[in-house]
Amino acid sequence: MVDYIGMSEIKRIVNKIGVGAFIEHLAEAIEDDYRRWGEFDKMPRTAHHSPEGVIELMPISDGRLYSFKYVNGHPKNTAAGLLTVTAFGVLADVDTGYPLLLSELTLTTALRTAAMSALAARWMARKTSSSMSLIGNGAQSEFQAIAFHRMLGIKELRLFDVDPLATAKLERNLRELPELFDLRIVCCASIAEAAFGADIITTVTADKRNATILTPSMILPGVHINAVGGDCPGKTELHADILTLANARIVVEYEPQSRIEGEIQQLPEDVPTIEFAKVVRGEAAGRETDDEVTIFDSVGFALEDYSALRMLHSLLREYPEIHRQIDLVPRLPDPKDLFGGALGSSAGRRLRLAA
């Protein structure tokens, strides 16, 4: 039997812990695993691109546990009443190859993306940061707002989306959360208005194209940019000149993947970046001065899903009332007899009757 987490299970787990607390707990698990960076067998995710979107597989292993995530990204899905992103994942035992956990990762990916964003900002944004601009108010936006309020103490959120209904949805959802009672929400008429004066700018748009969400004129000294939406070849959000500002520091998750899919796909390969693991391991600074512009070029990396699956698997032990299993792998009296053990004598009877 294999442990299983579907939508009903993940909703019960998150509701028991609380969304903000779950995100912070997950950020701690991700940070712990980034400190073990050298233990992981890493590779860029594999992707199948089509005119409508992308389907990707994201594998990783530390030699003891192996995980992978299946995830898609189809920006036009919402017109048909479908999600832009869906995902599921598997955590497996390396010694036997047996799956330990099959889990939904659609909701969990949103939670872990927000956890990673806030974790990176803890290391990179100015310690006095209190305001954030949130450009793109779709499916990921509530999670980002909750994470930054919980983990960095953000007190003002400046919102913009090309779709006013998305902004209205986000504002409504945030105002219904008691834990955000002290969060000031400002709805803005343009990207420039939202970005002006913000300590942190988060871009999380969905269009599959080289967009120019932010331009250099919008970037003030000391701002931290959390660039989340660019996550596949040909999909970016930042004007390339922002990346080459004289005082800009660019941090990525896994450089070989980010060169393909991140904002830095716009740059020559000799332009330096810093992998996040070096920051948490004390090998590089996330920020050196208050005037420095810092950029977290986030595309999502398999280690973060590994952390999420590992954490979810452990939480099932804490909440036995949620613990559910499925018979994904056969249990056989004789492991060398798959046919007889799985199909049994009934298969033989059907064959004889057919003869």
Image (cartoon, rainbow, N blue to C red):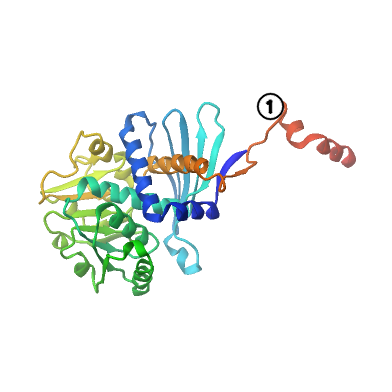
* Residue 122 visible here: yes
The one nearer the camera, 19 or 223, is 19
* Residue 298 visible here: no
The one nearer the camera, 179 or 30, is 179
Direction from residue 213 to residue 142 in the image, left or right: right
> Residue drawn 31% across and 44% down?
258
Kind of residue at badge 1 = Pro
Residue under label 1, please give it: 335
324 shown above or below 7: above
Callout 1: SS: loop
138 shown above or below 39: below
Residue 173 in picture, x, y percent from top left: 38, 67
Asked where in the image residue 41 lies, by quadrant, the reply is top left
Asked where in the image residue 164 lies, by quadrant, the reply is bottom left
Numbered circles on residues, count: 1
Q: Quadrant of the C terminus?
A: top right
